[in-house]
Amino acid sequence: GSAMGKIIGAITSLSSAVVFFLQGYVDIPAAMALSLGFAIGGWMGARTAAKAGNKYIKVLLVVVVLCSVAKLLFDYFSS
């Protein structure tokens, strides 16, 4: 089920990354910065979710989605 899907996804992602790297399409400093940001964000997100609980996470998700929609609408109507 879920574990097998994660393994297949990891293999697919890793093989894609290797192909792009070998073809020279990977900006190493940017990839390192993104990796660090994802790691820190994942760690902080997991800690926050464990401490704050489901209600906080649901409210936060709604706020983020509404802000994203507002930005998309602003960008669409201002151009």
Image: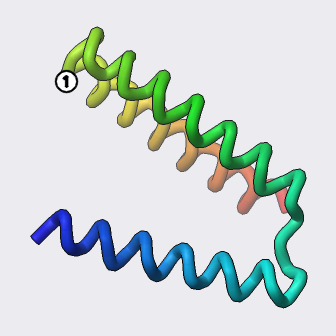
Image quarter of the N terminus? bottom left
Q: Residue 63 versus residue 44: which sits nearer the camera?
A: 44
Residue in the picture at 63% in, 54% down = 73
Q: Please give left or right for residue 63 compared with residue 4 in the image.
A: right
Where is residue 52 drawn, in percent x and y?
28, 11
Where is residue 60 drawn, in percent x and y?
39, 26
Residue in the picture at 16% in, 65% down = 2
Residue in the picture at 57% in, 37% down = 39
Question: Splitting the image into 4 quarters, where does residue 79 fall?
Answer: bottom right
Q: How many marks do you count on the picture?
A: 1
Q: Residue 64 versus residue 24: which sits nearer the camera?
A: 24
Colouring of the image: rainbow
The residue under label 1 is 54
Question: Splitting the image into 4 quarters, where does residue 7 fall?
Answer: bottom left
Question: Splitting the image into 4 quarters, where does residue 40 fall?
Answer: top right
Q: Please give left or right for residue 64 compared with residue 52 in the image.
A: right
Q: Residue 29 versus residue 56: which sits nearer the camera?
A: 29
Q: Secondary structure at mark 1?
A: helix
Q: Please give left or right for residue 23 compared with residue 36 in the image.
A: right
In the depicted structure, whether residue 71 falls above or below residue 23: above
Residue in the picture at 75% in, 83% down = 20
Q: Please give left or right for residue 23 compared with residue 62 in the image.
A: right
Where is residue 27 drawn, in percent x and y?
88, 65
Callout 1 amino acid = Asn
Residue at far left of view: 1
Where is residue 66 drawn, in percent x and y?
47, 39
In the depicted structure, whether residue 19 falls above or below residue 58: below
Query: Which class describes the residues within 10 Å of circle 1: few (<14), some (14-19), or many (20+)?
Result: few
